[in-house]
Structure formats: structure tokens, C-alpha cells
Image (tube, grey):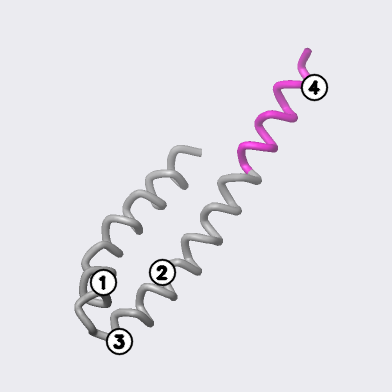
Amino acid sequence: MSKIFDEIKQKVAELEADVKKFDDGNNAAGGRVRKAMQDLKKLAQDLRQEVLTVKEARTAKK
């Protein structure tokens, strides 16, 4: 689970420069931001599913 979370943190860190570039008027950076956010959405969904799976497994043991 922490592997996915580490990927999310890394993606956000990489994205920071492009967000600043977009704020400064670079429209191409906006496209990169949108793609990275789509990747983050997938990673977030993967993390949510993994948390749910672990939670269900813990509950089943009780």
C-alpha cells in the first residue's frame, strides 16, 4: 500500500513545476498537468481499492 502512496507523492512533486509554468502562462504545461492529474486519479482509485481489500481481510479475521 505504501508503494502506491509513494507514487502519488512523487507524481505530485513532479507536477509542481508544471503547475507553476501553467500559472505563468505556459499552456503546454496545462496539458501535462491534466495528464498527470488523470494518472493521480487512477493511483488514488488503486489505493482506495487496496485499503478496502485490507480492511475487509482484517474484518473477516475477527
Q: Badge 2 is on which residue?
A: 36
Disc on res. 26: none
SS under mark 3: helix
Determine whether, in the image, residue 47 is placed left or right of residue 49.
left
Q: Badge 4 is on which residue?
A: 60
Whether residues under marks 4 and 1 lie with C-beta atoms below 8 angstroms apart, the answer is no
Q: Badge 1 is on which residue?
A: 18
**How many angstroms separate mark 1 from mark 2 (CA)?**
10 Å
Mark sitting earlier along the chain (1/3): 1
Task: Give neighbour class at mark 4: few <14, some 14-19, many 20+ (Cα, 10 Å).
Answer: few
**How many angstroms separate mark 1 from mark 3 (CA)?**
9 Å
The residue depicted at 38 percent of the width and 45 percent of the height is 6
**How many angstroms separate mark 4 from mark 1 (CA)?**
44 Å
Percent of width and height locating residue 23: 25, 74
Mark sitting earlier along the chain (4/2): 2
Q: What stretch is highlighted in magenta?
A: 50-62
**How many angstroms separate mark 4 from mark 3 (CA)?**
49 Å
Percent of width and height locating residue 26: 24, 84
Which of label 4 and label 3 is nearer to you?
3
Mark sitting earlier along the chain (1/2): 1
Disc on res. 28: 3
Residue 52 belongs to magenta span:
yes
